[in-house]
Image (spheres, rainbow, N blue to C red):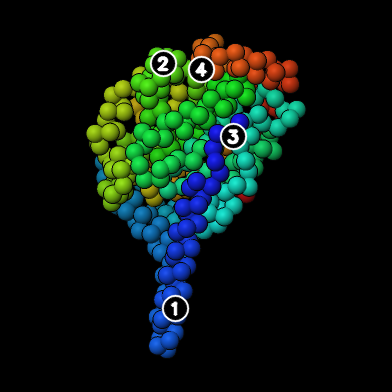
Amino acid sequence: MKVFSAGGVARRHRWVQVLVAGLVLAWGLLQASRGAWGWVLGGVLLPVLLPALAVALECLMSALFHAGDTSPRAGWRAWLRACGAEIGWCYRLFGWVQPWAEARFPDRPQGRPGRGGSRGVLLVHGYTCGRGMWQPWQAELDRAGIPYVCVDLLPMFGSIEHYAPLIEQGLRELHRATGRAPVVVAHSMGGLAVRAWWRWAQRVQGQGAQAVTARVAAVLTLGTPHRGTVLARAGLTTNARQMRQRSAWLQALAAAETPAWRARFTCVYSHCDNVVFPPLQATLDGAAALPLPGRAHLEMVFDPLVWQQVLALLRQAPAASEVEGAQQAIGGEGRQARQRAEQGQQPGVVGVDSGIGLLG
C-alpha cells in the first residue's frame, strides 16, 4: 500500500523555480529591449546569488546571537568552512534534488528482499524541505537493505500539529512491514512534528503515554529547535511562529511530555548551526545531547557521525514493551511481519559498513 504520494513538496519547489525563471526572463527581455545589459545581468545574478547571501546572513546572525549559551563559540575559520558547505548543500538540495529528483528513491518499508530482520527508519524532513532531501540516506539505507519510509510534511506552512497523522501513517507502514518499532530520524522542524505526534496519538487515538512511547525505538533529532530559535522571529507562517523561543505552543508541548518519552531522544546540535541558534536551543531536557562541532544546519544531516549513530540505534535489541506497543498499534499483522523477518535474519543491521560517509 502506498501511503505517500510522491511529489507533494517537490511540485511546490518546481513551481517556485518556474515562476522565478519566468520573472527573470520577462525582466531580461524588457531590459534588453532598452539596451540595459547591466540590468539584464543583474536580473540573472540576483536569484542565483540570493540563497548564498541568505545563508551568509544566517551564519552572521548565529555567530552574534550566542550570549548566554554555555556551548563553545565557533571561530571564524569554522564559520567560513560551515558557511561554504551550507551554501553548497543549499544549491544542491533546493536547486536540483528536491524539485526535480525527489522520486528517485521510493519508500521501501520492507527493506530489500533477503535482508529481513532489521527495524525500519522513518525519515522526517524540516521546514520548507521535502522527502527528496534524504536522497543520500535513501541510497545508503537501500544498499544496506534497511527498511525506510520518508514523509512529506504538508501543508508546508500550516501548524506543526497537522503533520501528526502523516507521521502516524509512516510509523504504521513500518510496523506492518517489520513488526518492530522504528528508529525516527528527524531534521529541524521534523523533530517537533514527532513530538507533536506523541501528544496527538494520545489525544486523538486514545492511547496511553506508555503505549505511544513504546511504538518508537529511538528518536534522533538533527538541529531541531526544541527550545525555539532566534531566526523564527522573522518567520510569519504558522509553523515558524510556533518555533519562536518561549512560544506558547512549545511550552504546551513540553508540559505534556513524560520522562520516558524524552529518554527516547538523542539531540544532535552544532555551534555552527545557521538556523537553530543559540546552539543549545536544539537540546531537550531529559534527552541525550550529541554535539557536532563545525557543521551547519543542512550539512549536519549528511555527517558520517550521524549515520554511525543511527546504525548504533538500529542494532539495539527490542525491549518487551516495544514489541507490545508495536503489536497493539497494528494487531496481528505486526506479529506475522516480525516472524517473517526473523526467518530472514536475526534482529540488527547485518553487513552494513559503519564507516559509510554520507558526505562523500
**Is 192 on the left or on the right of 336, as rendered?**
left
Picture residue at 57% right of the left edge, 37% below the top: 307
Return the residue nearer the eye: 183 or 276: 183
Q: Position of residue 311 (x, y in %)?
A: 60, 30
Structural crowding at the residue carrying mark 2, measured as other residues with C-alpha within 10 Å and reported as few (<14), some (14–19) or many (≥20): some
Give yes or no for contact between labels 2 and 4 (Cβ–Cβ under 8 Å). no
Q: Position of residue 160 (x, y in %)?
A: 36, 37
Give yes or no for contact between labels 1 and 3 (Cβ–Cβ under 8 Å). no
**Measured Cα–Cα span from mark 4 to mark 1:** 57 Å
Residue that carries the numbered disc 1 in the rendered image: 28
**Which is in the foreground here, disc 3 or disc 2?**
3
Q: Would you identify the image quadrant in which residue 6 lies?
A: top right
Residue that carries the numbered disc 2 in the rendered image: 207
Between discs 2 and 4, the one toward the N terminus: 2
Picture residue at 45% right of the left edge, 23% below the top: 264
Give yes or no for contact between labels 4 and 1 (Cβ–Cβ under 8 Å). no
Question: Which of the numbered marks, if any, corresponds to residue 329?
Answer: 4
Between discs 2 and 1, the one toward the N terminus: 1
Say which element carries label 1.
helix
Say which element carries label 3.
loop
